[in-house]
Structures are given as structure tokens and as C-alpha cells.
Amino acid sequence: MMIKKKADIIIFSGQSNMQGQAEGPSDHLPVGHAYEYKYLSDSLVPLADPAGEDITYEGGEGEQYQDCMGGNWHVKHVFGSAAYGYATLVPSFCRTYTGLTGKDVIAVSAAKGATTIDYWMPGTPAFRFIAEKLEGARRASSDYEITGTYVVWLQGESDAIESTGREEYRQKLAVFGHALRDTLGVDRFGVIRCGYFTGDARDLQIIGAQDDICKEDPFFLMLTEQMTTLNGMPEYMNPFAAGHLNTRGLDRIGHVSAVTLAESLK
């Protein structure tokens, strides 16, 4: 009997810092032992930036985000690839994770900028497409022994803009995460704590809510708190889009988050 190689499925979800809104391209080199499930072609491809897919609400192929598109892009797309064809944190995360665990990674990108927590709740198109992409990834990776399914989540800036309260955000994040666990079989929900975006007390409501849920609910794992530090370090931030990581920042956040998840599984 042939022994299957082991792999983990990791869903990368959230808003623009997860989708990728960097100042320039990454090296675009494929990551060894890591593959991305592409919904539009129903296939696994070697993982490289620009990670993600531009998928319309009808399930068809959309367009990569460019500045000239403005709000029209958001109206048409349920998920997006890296803006401008630039960088995401996904390759950095997977490169570190495979090195630490010795397992392959099947990456499932499900991110869209400018989204609040309500956008992701059970019953929404976003939740349905996460389910469809995960089902497709499992089917496409049938040659592997899948040893775990995890979420890496980076979102909350839009809720700060909308003045979502600490307890309201915590409760909704719990509903979203538990629905992924109970209906889709996700094993752990990793949170990259969001950084400062509004620059006032509204940010602290979301940051506090993410801290709370990771302390109170063992299903949720705080992957890193470094976003709040990097916000004050220009060398890690996109000078053309306030509150967004540049390529160097995405690489750093991806790496430290992968270390935390990998170490939690030992």
C-alpha cells in the first residue's frame, strides 16, 4: 500500500491586508511543498504571488484590482487576488510552515478588502464560497493525507471604521469561527491581530475583541500581535496606502504567524 504524503489545508481569509495591498511585487517565486487551490480551474498549482483569485458573485472569473476600478471592483467580486498583481503574506507563511512541520500546504485564499465581519457570517455569499473552495481543495488533494484544516484570519479594520463595539465584534467572530468548525470541519482558527487603522479608540475595540476571544475560547489562537507594532514602523508599511503592509511587512507577518501555528501543533 502506498503511503500518502501529509499536508495541511490552510484557509487565508480577511480583508485588504490579507488580500494584499502592497507597494510592489514580491519575487513571485513558487514555494516548495506548497500549492494553492484555484477554484476557477478546480486545480492545485504551485503557490506563488499574486496569490488568491478574482471571483465574481456568480462564480466566474473576475478582474485583478487596479486603482482605476474603484468601487466597481468591490460590487462585482466576492474574493480577490493580490491587488495590482503584487504581494500577499501567503507565500511567506507557507514557506515557514512547511519548513517547520515537514508537511505540504494546500492554501485556500478567501480574502476581500474593505469587508466588515458581517460580510463573512454564515448564510452570506462569502461563507458559501469559502465552503465551496474548501470542498474543492479537499477533492483536489485526495492524493494527500490531510492532517489538519486551519484558518489564518486578518480582518477588523473596516469594523473599526464602522465603530463596531468590542463585544459585538467578539460575538460575531465567534459565530463565524464556530460555523467554520461545526459545518466545515476547521480544526483551529488563527487570528492575526489587526493593527491601528482609524488611529483612535475604535481600533482598540476590535483589537480588544480579538484579544478576548483568543484568551477565552481555545478554538481561537492568537498568531501574532505584531501588526500594532509594525504600524509605527514606516519600513514595513505601504507609503501609498495608509494602514496597509508593504511587501516586507507581509513577509514578516506571514513568517511569525506560521511559527505560532506550527508550534501550537507540536
Image: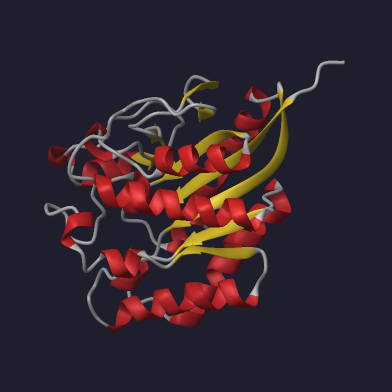
Residue beneath the point at 24% across and 81% down = 200
Classify 217 as above or below 106.
Answer: below
Quadrant in the picture for residue 202:
bottom left
Q: Nearer the viewer, residue 77 or 178?
A: 178
Quadrant in the picture for residue 188:
bottom right
Q: Nearer the viewer, residue 119 or 31?
A: 31
- Residue 237, position in %: x, y? 21, 56
Figure coloring = secondary structure
- Residue 124, position in %: x, y? 52, 51
Classify 74 as above or below 171.
Answer: above
Does any portion of residue 262 appear in the rendered image? yes
Tell me: 64 left or right of 53.
left
- Residue 48, position in %: x, y? 39, 29
Tell me: 85 left or right of 148.
left
Residue beneath the point at 69% across and 44% down = 148
Which quarter of the rendering shows the N terminus?
top right
Residue furthest bottom in the image: 201
Tell me: 177 left or right of 225.
right
Classify 174 as above or below 92.
Answer: below
Does any portion of residue 14 appear in the rendered image? no
Residue furthest top in the image: 1
Q: Nearer the viewer, residue 110 or 214?
A: 214
- Residue 206, position in %: x, y? 41, 74
Q: Nearer the viewer, residue 122 or 44?
A: 44
Residue beneath the point at 71% across and 21% down = 143
What is the tally of numbered marks visible in this picture? Answer: 0
